[in-house]
Amino acid sequence: MGVNEQLPAPAKAYQPVLDSIEAELRAGRLRVGDQLPGERALAEQHGISRASVRDAMRILEVMGVVRSGTGSGPTAGNVLISRPAAGISTALRMHVASAQLSVEEIVQTRILLESWAAEATDLEAHPERSRAVLDEAAGLLEAMEDPATPRGDFHDLDARFHVLLTSLAGNAVIEAMMESLRLSIRDYVAESITSEADWDRVVSTLRAQHREILASVAEGRRSDAARLVAEHIVWFHDRVAKPTR
């Protein structure tokens, strides 16, 4: 073996559990809501220790694939769930924190996703759901326009507003990625404004931009909505958010 060649990394002891669960899900033998076998059964099945099985379950829980419960019954033990945004968000937050992914790159991706979603929105495809989403978004705007709303709550409402509008495109992958992207930079956005005077100046513009975006979506002006949401993201990032590198 040459001096520059490296041996492949040894397989982790828990990996067979992850591979097996993925295969079972793909084959339809496991479904969301199913309870996984206990630690002892999985350890015997894969010839590994129960500690390695616990490692696998912890990884799946962080990935948003498993929910661990105590007690007995169908909700106890390790139950399969599907929360894709949770796992994506955790990974993105860590990589943004380590400066391997910059906030600027996350913002660029948000612009692509949200602009595409605005263009792809079809309110007539599912009119009842569309109306419910628009009503909920209007409620979020009302809460954001309340002067008594704390700044931290405003950022949470803002995140939910953007994810909601993205959901109108009807693409579950885009919606999950959008939610994870918002969560990955939420703390950086919230911490980028340090003075109350700066916040008062910025929040009035944010409210106006949100109203314009919602109106364009509700009226079916998809191109306008795509343009407005891109301008909104760029405006905040260029004028307020501090780059991480």
Image (cartoon, rainbow, N blue to C red):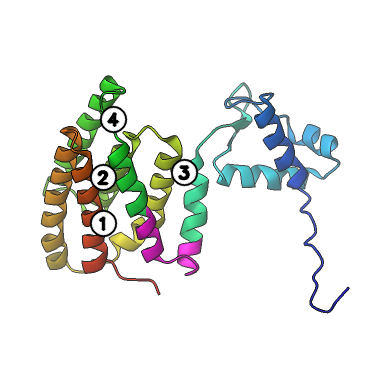
Question: Closer to the observer: label 3 or label 4?
Answer: 4
At label 4, which amino acid type do we have?
A: Asp
| Residue 12 appears left or right of 34 | right
State how far apart marks 3 and 4 are (Cα).
23 Å
Mark 2 lies on residue: 157
Q: Which of marks 4 and 2 is nearer the N terminus?
A: 4
Residue 55, given in percent of the width and then of the height, sits at: 69, 48
Mark 3 lies on residue: 85
At label 1, which amino acid type do we have?
A: Ile
Mark 4 lies on residue: 122
Q: Earlier in the sequence, mark 3 or mark 2?
A: 3
The quarter of the rendered structure image containing the C terminus is: bottom left
Q: Which of marks 1 and 2 is nearer the N terminus?
A: 2
Q: Earlier in the sequence, mark 1 or mark 4?
A: 4
State how far apart marks 3 and 2 are (Cα).
17 Å
**Can the viewer see residue 23 in this picture?**
yes
At label 3, which amino acid type do we have?
A: Ala
Residue 76, given in percent of the width and then of the height, sits at: 61, 28
- Magenta-drawn segment: 95-109
Q: Earlier in the sequence, mark 3 or mark 1?
A: 3
